[in-house]
């Protein structure tokens, strides 16, 4: 591709004109990756205060690791009825929540395997405990968990979502998207819901007033065409229901011997951040996963289109890696990267933490 046509695509993106799928493919293919990254940064600066980088914090509670879905990359799950699996009691969930609150973390991210033996009451009691008793914001349940719970409980999904929301569910993660194309789902997660179902569940959540995030997990055997189709499906869903507050590019982390993780180069990751910023013109926030990519690349991603560092995660079982572990570490990271930190809620509300500095920062 000539640099002239790359320039015209980048100019189009910068002026706010929507990019086509072939445009996105060219941005992913062009040898001039630094131009793409610079355009991602320019667009982020036009849309957000260039000085500010936001952050948030939550505790992950993986309430069960029993799962009857068999994703090839997963080392977290145990077979239903396995002797090694677990389901947390309400007391254990309460103890983890109290630990989070003691650290100044007032959001719980609850997610598990797909455990058909758990009744709806378990979910409702957990939500009432978390939101009702402790007052935390609860982000919870991936689309496959929600869909399977709806089927198991015999309750249509919109009705189920309303019940969960009433019990305390505040938002939903876009978990389990990986790559939404049929080809990649057949490779990665043939027993999970399809890409179309994933979009549909997220859309129904949005319609029920449950916003959330979206992501891509790459670094397997996906093609650039798979990546563009994935981005396009998310953008199309956002056009319909508008509940994706952010998009996060993640990479697969080594977990099991039966799944080979490809090395994702730094320039490849930065380009993905930039293309997400340029192509997903209807999603306001692009988050960098410092948890997954490390601090050096995370810092650069804030100059490639990202305006947020995703979050501090106190506990994460499905994606094993290291990242920012405390609120003060997040603040330090953002300052050292040359930005002013601003704490937000999981739903991108800023008024709750006016001082940016958490009282209990360590
Ligand atoms: S990634 Fe989630 S749905 Fe897939 S096997 Fe693991 S726990 Fe189950």
Image: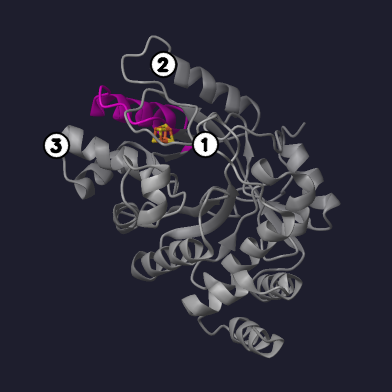
> Which residue is depicted at the point 66% across and 64% down?
271
Q: Earlier in the sequence, mark 2 or mark 3?
A: 2
Which of 156 and 4 lies nearest the eye of the viewer? 4
Question: Which of the 4 quarters of the picture holds residue 203?
Answer: bottom left
The residue depicted at 70 percent of the width and 68 percent of the height is 49
Q: Rounded to the nearest whole Å, what is the CA distance between mark 1 and mark 2?
A: 24 Å
Q: Residues within 10 Å of mark 1 (few under 14, many from 20)?
A: some
Name the spot of residue 158 as percent of width and height, x first: 22, 50
For marks 1 and 2 on the same chain, the one whose residue lies earlier in the sequence: 2
Q: Which residue is mark 3?
A: 154
Q: Which mark is residue 250?
A: none
Q: Name the residue tied to disc 2.
A: 86
Q: CA distance from mark 2 to mark 3?
A: 25 Å
Residue 61: x, y in percent?
Answer: 49, 28
* Relative height, residue 219 to residue 316 (above, below): below
Residue range highlighted in magenta:
111-137
Residue occupying image coordinates x 41% and y 36%: 71
Quarter holding the N terminus is: bottom right
């Amino acid at each position: 591709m000539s640099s002239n046509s790359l320039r015209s695509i980048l100019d189009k993106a910068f002026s706010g004109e929507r990019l086509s799928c072939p445009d996105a493919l060219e941005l992913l293919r062009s040898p001039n990756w630094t131009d793409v990254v610079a355009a991602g940064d320019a667009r982020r600066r036009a849309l957000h205060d260039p000085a500010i980088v936001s952050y948030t914090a939550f505790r992950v509670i993986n309430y069960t690791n029993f799962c009857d879905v068999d994703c090839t990359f997963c080392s977290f799950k145990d077979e239903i009825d396995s002797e090694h699996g677990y389901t947390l009691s309400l007391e254990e969930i309460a103890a983890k929540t109290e630990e989070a609150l003691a650290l100044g973390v007032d959001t719980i991210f609850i997610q598990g395997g797909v455990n058909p033996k758990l009744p709806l009451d378990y979910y409702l009691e957990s939500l009432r405990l978390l939101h009702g008793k402790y007052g935390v914001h609860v982000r919870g349940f991936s689309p496959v968990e929600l869909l399977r719970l709806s089927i198991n409980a015999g309750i249509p999904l919109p009705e189920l979502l309303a019940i969960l929301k009433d019990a305390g569910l505040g938002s939903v993660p876009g978990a389990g998207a990986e790559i939404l194309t049929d080809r990649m789902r057949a490779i990665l997660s043939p027993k999970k819901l399809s890409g179309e179902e994933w979009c549909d569940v997220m859309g129904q959540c949005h319609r029920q007033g449950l916003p959330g995030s979206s992501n891509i997990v790459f670094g397997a055997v996906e093609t650039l065409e798979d990546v563009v189709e994935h981005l396009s499906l998310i953008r199309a869903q956002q056009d319909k229901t508008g509940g994706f507050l952010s998009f996060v590019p993640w990479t697969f982390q080594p977990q099991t011997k039966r799944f080979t993780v490809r090395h994702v180069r730094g320039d490849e990751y930065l380009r993905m951040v930039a293309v997400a910023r340029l192509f997903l013109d209807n999603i306001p926030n692009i988050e960098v996963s410092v948890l997954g990519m490390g601090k050096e690349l995370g810092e650069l991603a804030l100059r490639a289109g990202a305006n947020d560092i995703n979050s501090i995660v106190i506990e994460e079982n499905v994606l094993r890696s290291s990242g920012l572990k405390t609120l003060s570490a997040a603040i330090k990271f953002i300052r050292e990267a040359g930005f002013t930190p601003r704490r937000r809620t999981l739903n991108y509300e800023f008024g709750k933490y006016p001082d940016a500095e958490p009282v209990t920062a360590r």
